[in-house]
Amino acid sequence: MNALALQLNEKMQKENSAIYDMLSDLGKNLYYPKGILSQSAEAGKKAHRFNATIGIATENGEPMHFRHIQDKLGYDPKDIYPYAAPQGKEELRLKWKEKLLVDNPSMQNKSIGTPIVTSALTHGLSIAADLFMNPGDVLITPEQYWGNYNTVFQIRRGGRVETFPLFNENGGFHVEAFRETLAKQQEKAIVLLNFPNNPTGFTPSIEDAEAIVQVLKDVAEAGTKLIVLLDDAYFGLFYENSIKESLFGLLAGVHPNILPVKIDGATKENYVWGLRVGFITYAATPDVLDALEQKTKGIIRGTISSSSHISQTIILESLKSPEFQTEKEEKFQIMKGRAVKTKQVLANEKFAPYWTYYPFNSGYFMCLKLNDVDAETLRLHLLDEYGVGVIASNKTDIRVAFSCVEESDIEELFDLILEGCKDLTK
């Protein structure tokens, strides 16, 4: 094992051996090399005469570039063309942390790392899988989960997904099913909670959120080491009857056997999906945070090297804009209006013979649970006969993204789904 990896591991073992034990074999071997990038960083601070370290070209004192590209862009060449650091632009990292602390009061006065820039949410999940999952390790997540988790945790890392029912009989978070599933784990488990949930659009109440934290504390107290991944892709889109912040702040520092990891981003929160800017943030003691950042930088350096510089610049300028909060509230109200309209439409009794729907109060989506029709059969029928696209999540459930349907069109959308169901039950 490399001496730098050993130093990081020793630091973690000394500070919190439980978190060191959570690392995968790959995670234990990871470190950030003192190579070209670190030497270039030193030169960037001290090489006032000539800096001949990094693999870019310069011209007239700025990064070399094509005029036909620059003419279409409104940013300084230095904020577009050079490589960003593996951990991301420092000003963006600090600005996102500032946003997290405002949006999540429970994070105040907790030992939380500076967010590390990822190439959006999937990359953040992949980093977590690399750091913490060995073949055979268990990932615990609700039955309704995003299918890409299978690729990230099972196919890439050889993990095993174990699920529990998301909803209890009252339509709230199934705390007891969560407890029972988690209690089966003896040494280590990775828990993945995604709120607002994809595909159902559900976020638990404040009471249920507190109960979730208590379950995790109880299991940690019994000796199980827990890596708790919070997939907060749709953070902030909370419309009614739910907790309004991430569980990350509630879990930070709650027990030495719990490592909270927040994975979020501007992609869906700020409607910039194609810019691919996300973040991964850890909550731990300072030395452990430093070690985890170095290991995370090592993963990034060894995979994508760094995230898009221009995308980071655009997001940073957006966060600093005086229009940011105003426009964000405008879009929130549009999304909330679509969610409320969806519930109003679905209250019509004419739909009852064909489906029920899972509770939803947040995010981009909601799910129908079909009574008699196969979901994939209905999906294809709606495409072929009505030109309507939905997602078949499993044999009984279809996901409907109200996020991409105008409020005025929502009633027609569900009427067409109804017609499809009628066709298939004649």
Image: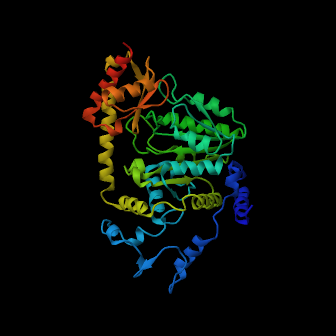
* Quarter placement of the C terminus: top left
Q: Residue at x 68, y 48 (%)?
A: 22
| Vertical comparison of 240 with 298: above or below | above
Q: In this view, does 66 lie above or below 354?
A: below
Residue appearing at x 45%, y 21% in the figure = 374
For the N terminus, the image quarter is bottom right
Give the x, y percent position of residue 114. Answer: 53, 59
Residue 320 vs residue 418, the one in the foreground: 418
Name the residue at 37% across, 49% down: 271
Q: In the image as oriented, which residue stretches furthest toward the left?
A: 408
Instruction: Tell whether 419 sits left or right of 241.
Output: left
Can residue 397 be seen in this snapshot? yes
Between 132 and 16, the one lying in front of the other is 132
Please say which color scheme the image uses. Answer: rainbow
Name the quadrant containing residue 187: top right
Q: Residue at x 33, y 44 (%)?
A: 332
Q: Is residue 87 above or below residue 161?
A: below
Answer left or right for 12 relative to 302.
Answer: right
Q: Toward which corner of the image does residue 160 lie, by quadrant? A: top right
Report whether residue 361 is seen.
Answer: no
Give x and y (percent) for residue 270.
Answer: 38, 50
Q: Please give left or right for residue 87 compared with residue 25 in the image.
A: left
| Residue 136 percent location from the top left of the image | 69, 40
* Position of residue 350 measured from the top left corner of the image (x, y, whole percent): 32, 17
- The image shows a total of numbered marks equal to 0
